[in-house]
Structure formats: C-alpha cells, structure tokens
Image: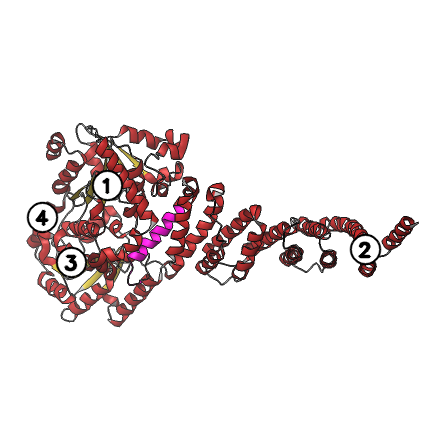
Amino acid sequence: MENAVRKLFARLVRALPFSLQRHVLGVLGNPGLGLRLMNEELARLAERALAVQRPEPLPTVAKAVVTALRVIAPLNLATALRGETQVRALLAADPSLSDFEFLGRMARIADAMANADPGGRTTAPKIAVSLALRTERERVRLADMERQRQLVASNLLSLVELIHQDDVRAARDLLRKVAPGLADAQMGAGALAASILKALPDNLAQDPAASPLLSHRAFFIATVAVTTSHDFASTEKFAQHLLASGPSAFDPIRTSYVMVLEELLRTCGNPAGVDHPSPLRIAENSTRMQTDAERLLAPWRQSLGYRLVIDRETQTRAKAATAPRHLSAGKRVLVITNGNWFFLHEVIDALENMHGVQCRTFDFALAQESYELSPREAALPRSAETSAARTHGDSFDASLFKQLLAWADVIFVEWCEWAAVWLSDYLPSSKRLVVRLHSYEAFAPTPHFVNWANVDALVFVADHIMKFFNVQFSERLTHTTQTVIDNIRDLGAFQCDGEAHRDCVLGMLGYNNANKNPRMALEILRALRADDPRWKLRLLGPAWPEDAELGAHELEYKTAFFADLAAFDLTDAVQFVGEVPSHAVNRAMLDCGLILSCSEREGTHEAVVEGIASGCVPLIRNWPTSAAYDGARTVYAPLREFVFDSVEQAVATARAHGAPDAAARRAIAARGVAAFDQGATLPGLLDVLFPAPAARLEASRL
C-alpha cells in the first residue's frame, strides 16, 4: 500500500510544471524523488542548451553547465535547483546579450556549482575551471592590449589548463587570484606577470620532470615578470629548483632562463638606470663598469647561469688537459656570420685568392631559420657530453651546416654573437675557432655565454675595446689568444682632390642616433660660424626614424637636436644629404672638407677612415666610453693631432685646418691609407687564422 501511494504521488508531482515541482519537493523533502525529477528535467534542459541560437562552442558550454547541475544535485539539491533556474533564464535571454556575456554568465553558474563541492567529489569543479578558461581566453581575444600582455595572459591560461589536469583546486585558486589582473586591460605585461608569479602555487615545480610543459609555461611568465620588475631572486630560486629536479625539467625552460640572464646582465651594466636597450653603451655606465666591474657583475656571478657557464668551461679545460687537442694544420677556412657581411668582403676576397687556401662561407641566420638551431640552446648546456647531433637529431646530421663544419680546419666567426656561443659549445675540439669582436658586443650580454675554453683566438678591432672587454672577462680568457687587428679595408680605389668648394665644410656620415651625438656637431658649427659664416655642415646617412619607432632615450635626444638646430639659427647652414650607398661614399666625401666624429662610443668609426682616404681632415672626439684608454688617439695614432677632448679644441683644430691646399689633403689621405688599408692589416689577420710559417710567408706576398 505504501509503495502504491508513493508511485501515485510521484505521478502527481511529475504532472506539475517543474517550477511547482521545486516547491513541492522543498516542502516534502524527498531527495530520492527530487533527484529523479531533477535528472528528467535536466535531460530536457540539455537538449534545449544544444539547440540555443549561439555559435559554437557556446551551445556545448551550456550543456556542460547542465552537466555540472546534474553531478552536483546529489550533493546539494538546493544549489542545483537554483542553478537550473539561472540556466533556464539564460537560455531564454534576450538575443541582444553578447556571446561573451553569455559565456561569462555560464561560467559563473558553473563556479557556483563548484563552490557547492569544496572537496572536489564531483566533476563540477573541473567543469567550472574549463568554462572559466574559455571565458578568459575570449576576454584575451577581444581585449585591446599590448602584445606582450597577450602572451603573458595566453601562457597563464595554458598553465592553468595544465595544472587543471592534476589539481583542479590549485587551478581554481590561481584563476581567482589573477582574474582581476586579466580583466584589467590597462594593466601592463610586467605587472600582470608579477601578479601571476606571486600567485603561483608553491608546489608548482615539485616534480617538473613529470610535467616539463608546466614548468616551461610558468617560467615564461616568470621571465616576463623578472624582465620588468627586476625581481631576479624569485626566478633564480625557481631555476635552481628545476635544475635540482634533473635535466629533463630544466631543458624546456633553458631558453627562457637565458633571456632572464640577459636582462640581469643589462641591469648589471646599467647602474645609472638609463632608459636604453643597451645601457652599457652609455658613457656614464661604461665608465662605472671600467672602475667597478667586480661589484656591478656580482649579481650575474652569483647566478645559476654563471655557475653553469663556468662549469662548462672548467670541464672543457679539464678534458683538454687529459686529452690535448690536435688541431688540424690544414688551410680550409669556413667564414660564419649572422646576416652582417659588411666587414668581411675584403677578408673573403683575400682568402679566395690565396694559394693553398680553400674558403667557404655560411650565414648562421640560415641555421637558425632552416635547421632550427637555437643558439640559446647552447648557452646553458646539459652536460659536457651534449652534442649538436644529440640535440637536433637526424635533421641536423644531414644539414649543410654540419657538412661544412666537418670540412673546415679553421672556423672564423664574425661578431661575438649567438653564433659564437653556439659554436664554442658544439664545435669539435680538432677545429680551430677564431672569433672577431668589433665594438657593440663588448657592451652586450652575449659574450658572457661563450665557452671561452673552446675559443682559440679572439680578434679585436681596437685596443680600447680589448681593454674594456678584459675588465669583464680577463679571468676567463687564459686559454684564448687576444690580438688587436684593425678592420680589413680596400682603400686603393679612393680618390682625393683639393678643390676649394670643400673648404669650411664639415661632414658627418651617420648621425641619426644619440650615440653619434650630432648635437655636438651643431655646437661646433655654431662656434665656427660666429667668426666665419662660410662654415657648413653636411649630414650624410639615413634620416631620423619616426618618433613612434624610437625609445624614450632616443626620442628625447632627437627632439633636443631639432630644438638646437632652431635655437642656434643653423637651419640654412645644415644640409641633410640622405642615405649614401657604400659605392658612393668616396664621391660624397669629396664634397666635405673635414670628417667629423662626435660619438659617445666607437670601435674604429669606419666613416672617419673613409673620409681620410678621400682627403678630408679628420676631427675626432676622444670618445667618452673609451677616454680612460685614450681610445680614439690609439686607433688614429698616425693622425692623433686631430683628436679633441672639448668643443673648444675641435673649433681651434677646424679653424687651423679648414682650408688646406691640395698637397696637404693628399698628404693626410696618404697617411691614412698607409695605416688603415688592407696591405697594413690583412697579414695580421691571416697570421691568426693560419699561425704557421707558410701562412705568414703567403700573407707577405699579398
């Protein structure tokens, strides 16, 4: 009798609209019947969700929320009933409701289901996180935000998704902590990344070997955070933990860690806090590095990265001590650069025309693009036994690059950039490795990652660059021969004339940045014109970049330059010539009487050499970044009387030599060619490449 009454009651309740069923069930408190009725209604609601007039995946999202209602109902029927009402209302909502808002409301309903199950006994929390991720991805897609911030947000969502697979509660907590930052489209990438880094679970990297992708995503976020907030300690702690977990954990984030270390090195070289992409090139900073390198480099030398680099060099030296290197005596040379061949043309011509020498070339940029050889992979190698073949597999073994490396006896690397880093780590010990460093590399982070124990010879283009470099690296260069050899130039074709139209004309080739310091040129011109209005200034080279393309430091300088131009009333005395092709430099210089260098930093300043060979009187500032080493006077020793330390000295020299006769111009040109032409410089470079008597004899015949 009791069962019959129960069945009759159930039929009566089912006959009621679900809104009334809810009230009856609430009064009678029959959970068993309530669940059956709830499931029946939710099955119908799921069909309605899939039929909703929204683009995919929104109908599927709606069905997922209905599923969350079904799984939470046995745990908390009252919460499920409230959620069902909200879903029903949302499915019937005004079509003007945006898809994004529809998705967001669904996510909030699912979140309420998850809150009713704090112990994670059902799949409701997992569904809630999945929907929250979809909502945030849509927010990122629609938001108007900087590219770097989009990358940070995207990596966060991927990170949460990875955490979600193993720890739903941790994923939900992380999303809740950072949701305000994600919603705030005005928050910058660095601030967002810093907030994410702070919110990451402490146990995130407990077993990174089991989930290297998780570590990689987290470390990318940490990279952005550290490069903007300079909180290197947090990232260093994370990196140490990853390394302790084994190479399989550390390898995926190695590139990101090197990026952090690059930023750390820039910070070490920027005690003045200058807003500049390469702060060590600022005179104030480079001067401090010359006098206080040990203190400035201390943070880098205390880092995990430095320890790994030094360990690698120590292992290389130990291996060489037990198994001495047997360098080939052959004369097959491979010349490698990374897209910039400007200073190599004469070198390659000489090698190709040298009896007994075979020369081939390779652009390392092709290796990075075509063979996916990331030089940062070599920056922090896993072990001394790591090889390029092991790192890159069969695709590398079959590459032209490896064939060329196997063929060569000597590898000459132009520029101390990432190609030098890569080759110093992976080149077989039987090969002779020679690296040529020009100027800017001495002020950059890259050389800190080179395995100097594997570099046989380091060629500098100027003595002051070598001295500045040794301030930072002397203790690591004990096994590397250091030589100063000026750039190799063919000046034989340069013409020189003494026509009077060149008199009182200052020329400046390359002027459109703060380092070239054209404001000093304006000061010199103004002082000269105070006594003689014939003086003019010709600015040759590309124009200033557009304001939007410049950083704060460069934009400020550009603005000040044009303000000076107007304030000094020099508009009619300054001519902007425009870009000059390399083959037309000699012709352009013949319209200048003096070649001016006002730079803050230079290695050799090629424009001055070309001006001298064209008969220009040099007017060379003692560049501040190397003034302690008397850099300009050392580079231009044969013409050191034309180096100045102040505007007043420059003006006096210009007045004394502003209108020389033809013979005087030819004499200056002859002195320059004798010192700087390839006939004077090439034999020294060949001596470094092939340090054997036969090679020296051959060089002397050129």
Q: Residue at label 1?
A: 435
How many marks the image carries: the answer is 4
Query: Is 282 situated left or right of 400 in this image?
Result: left
Spatial distance from mark 2 to mark 4, Cα to Cα?
108 Å
Q: Which residues are magenta?
A: 255-273
Residue sitting at x 86%, y 56%: 16
Q: Earlier in the sequence, mark 2 or mark 1?
A: 2
Q: Earlier in the sequence, mark 3 or mark 1?
A: 1
Spatial distance from mark 1 to mark 4, Cα to Cα?
31 Å
Q: Residue at label 3?
A: 628
Q: At numbered mark 2, what does the secondary structure look like: helix, strand or loop?
A: loop
Q: Residue at label 4?
A: 670
Residue 301 on image: x %, y %: 29, 51
* Crowding near the residue tagged with mark 4, few <14, some 14–19, many ≥20 C-alpha atoms within 10 Å: some
Q: At numbered mark 1, what does the secondary structure look like: helix, strand or loop?
A: strand
Q: Are marks 1 and 4 in contact (CB under 8 Å)?
A: no
Q: Earlier in the sequence, mark 2 or mark 4?
A: 2
Q: Earlier in the sequence, mark 2 or mark 3?
A: 2
Question: In this view of the protein, which residue sits in the foreground, 187 or 610?
Answer: 187
Q: Earlier in the sequence, mark 3 or mark 4?
A: 3
Front label number (1 vs 4): 1
Q: Residue at label 2?
A: 30
Residue 505 on image: x %, y %: 17, 60
Q: Amino acid at mark 2?
A: Asn
Q: Amino acid at mark 4?
A: Ala
Q: Amino acid at mark 3?
A: Ala
The relative height of residue 202 versus residue 365 in the rendered view (above or below) is below
